[in-house]
Image (cartoon, rainbow, N blue to C red):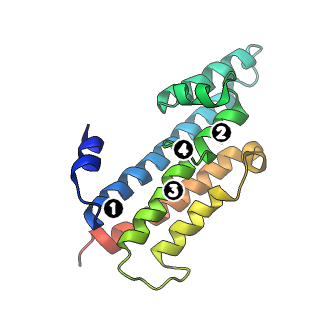
Amino acid sequence: VIKGFIDNTLLRNEEWRLISLGIYLERAIQVCQILQTKLNDLEKIQSLNEAVVLESFHWTTILESTESYDMYMRCQKVIPNRHNVLHFLLFDTDFPKSVAFSLANVKRCIAGISFQEELNKTSLDFIAGKLSCRFGYQTIDEIEDTAAAFLKDTLDSIYELAYLLDAKYLKYS
């Protein structure tokens, strides 16, 4: 309801971009954290004989907890599995709850509020672009076996970006 109110009533100015930026950062963080937790759970059940059934249940639960199950089934049309769910929630650029979609929008929002900052390796625009491109030029096949480490690195990068945003736009000294 609040997101609808924000999207339908505010001018598309710096304030709207800053609010949207927070929404997209939070969404990317939440999806990564949910995936991290479930990957940890799945690692614990690998030794059970019913691992295949439980694994399918866990991937379905991940999709449901991210409000993604219906869209996943519409797009993938297969029982949820590790490969397809990770691809959908991390790299699908058309799905609004995916990390790739969120980070692309983070980059757009930062570009709209950057106050003509010079583009260099420490600028917010550069850091956000680098993080967003990481998802544009990487495939699920490259990270699937090391998904937990990939998610940790991604979260660390998002937290670093959030810290820099906080220091630049929200803290006054």
From the viewer's perspective, is residue 85 above or below residue 119? above
Tag on residue 87? none
Foreground residue among 167 and 23: 23
Q: Nearer the viewer, mark 2 or mark 4?
A: 4
Dot 3: within a 10 Å radius of its alpha carbon, few (fewer than 14), some, or many (20 or more) residues? many
SS category of the residue bearing label 2: helix
Mark 4 neighbour class, 10 Å CA radius: few under 14, some 14 to 19, many 20 or more: many
Q: Which quarter of the figure is the N terminus placed in?
A: top left
Pinpoint residue 4: horizontal percent, then vertical percent. Answer: 28, 42
Q: Is residue 4 left or right of residue 103?
A: left
Quadrant location of residue 71? top right
Identify the amino acid type marked 1: Arg
Name the residue nearer the viewer: 76 or 44: 76
Secondary element at image label 1: helix
**Other-residue count near label 2 (Cα within 10 Å), few / some / many at <14 / 14–19 / ≥20:** many
Of mark 3 and mark 4, the one earlier in the sequence is: 4
Q: Quadrant of residue 69?
A: top right
Helix or strand or loop: what does disc 3 sit on? helix
User: On the picture, is 112 further left or further right than 35?
Assistant: left
> Whole-Å distance between the Cαs marked 2 and 4?
10 Å
Residue 103's tag is 3
Quick one: label 1 or label 2, which is nearer the N terminus? 1
Q: Which residue is mark 1?
A: 17
Residue beneath label 2, please? Answer: 86
User: x and y percent of residue 161 in the render?
Assistant: 47, 65
